[in-house]
Image (tube, grey):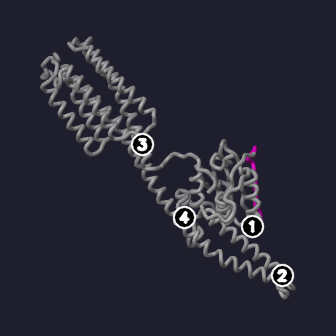
Amino acid sequence: MSTRPATAPERSPRSADAAAGLKNLQQLIQLRWIAVVGQVFTIELAHYSLGLALPLRELLLVVGCLAVFNIVSLLRLRTGLAVRNVELFLALLIDVAVLTVQLYLSGGTGNPFVFLYLLQITLGAVLLRGAYIWTIVAATVACFGALARYHLPLDLPQDLHEGLPTLYVTGLLVCFALNATLVVVFITRISLNLRERDARLADARRRRVEEEHIVRMGLLASGAAHELGTPLATLAVILGDWQHDAQLKASAPLQEDIAEMQAQVQRCKSIVSGILLSAGETRGEASVPTTVCSFVDALAREWRHTRSLPRFDYRNDFGADTPMVSDTTLQQMVFNVLDNARDASPHWVGMRVTRDGEALRITVTDAGPGFAPGMLERLGTPYQSTKNRPGGGLGLYLVLNVARTLGGSVTARNRPEGGAEVTIELPLAAVAHPG
């Protein structure tokens, strides 16, 4: 196919994982900024308001290191490169290490904020798989055990029996509320990222199945086209002989019928050539430099000439013309939509060509019964048709996939005044002339 696909978002499984990884890294960065602000606030409150003896310089130095690491992570995020699981694993290990140092400097396991380890484990359970998450669990358990023995003392009153008014129980309450809030907010966001990734993976698998289906249909069509070539050539020779036969020349009606049959055979040969061209087996020029207005005008003129239809309303409102490359696939795509409209509305079909920014828009309307609601919901699904014939329902399916390959789209709706409307939208960059 001579037209060039427009750049479209990649839908491969690898890109789905990459997008989810970037979003998850962004969530960790946001959570880390909250930790930086919260730690500074807690240190200042404990040291100045509550009068607790803390190694203030060392604690603020650790917070500063965490802020620097977060800035590096932010720069890493802006590169847009895929985030691997090992990067998320190392980032969580660094968060665990920073929390451990902070707790070592402020009472170890006697600090009520020691239960923030549970937040790290929860994040790891959502973000990581297999050995990574169990390594996080082992690291936090080891750090907890080490802090029980090695830590700087924190002078907290030992009056737990008084309940909530005590500093330790109040700290536990704050830690619990903080854990619960962050788990709900960030785990919800991360789960949404993962669900979006799973949806993209499912879409990629569906697209792959559809593309394989198209390839199989293309092989069948190509084989059928090859097989039809010989009988069509034979018919053309026979009709040529009939046209020059002396007895048949005497009958004007027969001569008209022979001329019509020759035209139809020629049309069949053109269709076969188009099938082979679309399959990559060129029997003519693969592409034709033209302009948008010339292409759509010729397309409308040929369709009107080769189809019997009482009324065909065509409007070209594209505006300033622009160069493009045309081939049979583009023409056949529009012909499929027009043929479907004629089947639904044998007395009238309309086509309008407009420009929407940097996109070519072709709108085909009819006065038929319109689409059934179920068909609109499954637009582009193969074998969804109201024609009740074998193989029906492939037209829009192929149109949708050709448009998607070019970075465009196909939409359909039922008109309020009756009938249906199908709109093909293609980026001009996808059909632009390379010169």
Image position, residue 415 (x, y; %): 65, 54
Q: Is residue 152 left or right of residue 91?
A: left
Q: Disc 1 designates what residue? A: 306
Rendered view: 338 above or below 391: above
Res. 388 image quadrant: bottom right
Rendered view: 340 above or below 93: below
Provide the residue span drawn in magenta. Answer: 309-320
Which element carries disc 2, helix, strand or loop?
Answer: helix
Which element carries disc 1, helix, strand or loop?
Answer: helix
312 magenta-colored: yes
Res. 308 image quadrant: bottom right
Q: Disc 3 designates what residue? A: 18
Q: Are marks 1 and 3 in contact (CB under 8 Å)?
A: no
Q: Earlier in the sequence, mark 1 or mark 2?
A: 2
Residue 253 is labelled as: 2
Residue 384 is labelled as: 4
Q: Of discs 4 and 3, which sits in the foreground?
A: 3
Query: What amino acid is found at the position of numbered circle 4 in the picture?
Result: Gln
Which element carries disc 4, helix, strand or loop?
Answer: loop
